[in-house]
Image: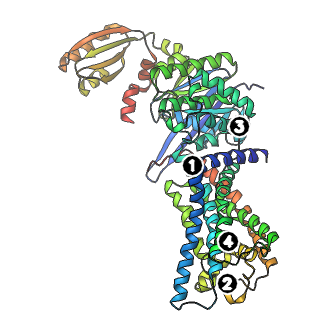
Amino acid sequence: MQRFLQAFRVGAWLGWKTESNWTNPLFYILWSLLLPMSNGLIMTMMLRVLQRTGNSSGADLLPYVFIGTVVYSIVALLLDSMAWAVLEDRERMGMLKYIAITPSSMYGYLWGRGFAKVSINFLAVPLTLTFGALVLDIPIRLSTINWPLLLVVVVLGLLIVTFAAQILAGVTLMIARHAGFVGQAVSGALYLFTGALFPITVLPNWMQVIARAVPLTYWLEGMRRALWVDAQNPVYNTGLNQLSTTNLLLILLASAVAMAVISIPLQRRAEHRAKEKGLLDMNTAY
Amino acid sequence: MQPEYAIRTVNLQRTYKTKERVLKALDGVDLAVRPGELFGFLGPNGAGKTTTIKILTTLLLPSGGTAEVWGFDVLHEADAVRRHINMVSGGESSGYGLLTVRENLWMFTQFHGMDSKLANKRIDELLEVMGLADRAKTRVSFLSTGLRQKMNYIRGLLTDPDVLFLDEPTLGLDVEAARTLRTYTRHWLDTNPGKTVVLTTHYMQEADELCDRVAIISGGTILACDTPTSLKYSLQQDVVFRLFTTPVAPAFLQAVEQIEGVQSISQRSGDQRDELSLILRDDAILPQVLSQLATHNAGLLSLEKRQPTLEDVFVNLVGHSLSESETTA
């Protein structure tokens, strides 16, 4: 545990230095805010256009879309963070081999890198939600937010995504530079399947089956319930309205445990395989 | 507690399998390096030097045999091995460009769990020794390759490892920087009894000057392992000549190799002339070699009888010079 924490601390420090150090702080804050904000605005505009052309179901899905899109920005960042750290350290910096021969924990280090990326960008989420509440009249009010639920859901969700990110880092250890697209491809696919953009009920039946098997679907639902008092209203037909919040939390907890059970041995296996094939210092140079 | 051997390998093997073929990078390497030694691996590219280092530093798993570093098995006790080692590889521009030199170095001390105050003290000392003190706050991206290499060398020493692996550490360095690095490596060993350095190089002079013992490795096999003096002494009964000639054809080399008493001949082609290293069983064979020169329409420019070098030992063992091996590789 001490080795894990030690490596986590160094990984977080390095992540902070490399993620936030490339431009001046003002530009960085602007960039961090503009990215989720512009995503939210694009989705809002698309939704408004659809509603005006007569394809609306009657329910105003703006809060659903806005919260989903803004919260998902963190998923995409975290999911890709560890795989990106592996690629950057191995191929661009040529340093992964030097980290691998230290007595520290590789997992701790990668978790630290992921933590740094999320922390740096996390502030953008409440700020963008505030922007949505003030400018787009998204019904998020400090007085109606379910804070305890929010806390539990955030922690469980971040754990799930972190373990998933660890699996992607393991995959990246074993393949070449184009593995950089793995994280993006997975987060892109999940964007479709997790109900971030639209309720999963609009998906064909077979896709709904996949969506219900993805833990992040429940995480986004939990986030909406914590932030938006009307999230469970049947009029939105999200496909998860009938699920009680207790059951939703149990699903999230079970998912977090399952992801841990899967990802830790998988990462170990990936590290062993990388050593077996001599991939820890691979440089594909393309 | 100091182990009997800093490094011990028995029948160490490593194969790389591709779709097309199976390549034996190491074919039964046996090594025994004692604490306090500066042990050198001498061989051309692809000989197996770096593969051996990778296995010993726990970056690569062996395909067979056993390897121990500081008494710990690299396969089953990798964490324990890592507490006793560090490594510096040459010829690469690694390092986090956005971090300063000090930050890069400090970060690695933290991976080893060093006290931050002690780490900074050591960083200051080593920056001073390597002439990088005024670059402590410079971002690594602004350093030349040579300065980055010096920084990496400091990184290797910072944690005070029991076994330091230097993989071609002077590759790409200018003469002065290479000399500083060699001198300090020797000094570090002299002032820290029991510390061990494993050096891979393809610079003969570097191995000759620095190493207590040298293993000549080629094709994944150790061909000879002894002190540089003893290796050279093994050729003392032979006679070594250096000839400068007008360019010679491969047929000449083949003809010379057929002469009885010619131990080896290697060629280094230059501008309008060739340099030939010739090892003969005795002086009396030389006229036959010279007559072959005339037969093949080549002219002798100069001839010198000299003491054997490690290069001669290498040629005698491998059958060709290091530069020829690299051209082939």
Q: Residue at x 57, y 32 (%)?
A: B152
Question: Residue A69, image x and y in percent?
Answer: 61, 72
Q: Of callouts 1 and 2, which one flags the residue occurring earlier in the amino acid sequence?
A: 1
- Nearer to us: label 3 or label 1: 1
Residue underneath mark 3? B112
Question: Residue B43, image x and y in percent?
Answer: 47, 28
What's the distance in space between the residues labelled 1 and 2, CA to CA? 42 Å
Q: Chain of mark 1?
A: A
Residue underneath mark 2? A238
Q: Is residue B141 above or below residue B281?
A: below
What's the distance in space between the residues labelled 3 and 2, CA to CA? 50 Å
- Same chain for the residues at labels 4 and 1, yes or no? yes
Residue underneath mark 4? A216
Identify the element where label 3 is drawn.
loop
Verify CB contact (< 8 Å) between mark 4 and mark 3: no
Q: Residue at x 50, y 22 (%)?
A: B177
Q: Residue at x 75, y 66 (%)?
A: A156
Identify the element where label 1 is drawn.
loop
- Nearer to us: label 4 or label 1: 1
Verify CB contact (< 8 Å) between mark 4 and mark 1: no
Verify CB contact (< 8 Å) between mark 3 and mark 2: no
Question: Looking at numbered disc 2 in the image, what kind of residue is underneath it?
Answer: Thr
Q: Chain of mark 2?
A: A
Identify the element where label 4 is drawn.
helix
Q: Is residue B160 above or below residue A75?
A: above
Residue A6 occupies quadrant: top right
Question: Looking at numbered disc 3 in the image, what kind of residue is underneath it?
Answer: His
- Nearer to us: label 1 or label 2: 1
Residue A144 occupies quadrant: bottom right
Residue underneath mark 1? A24
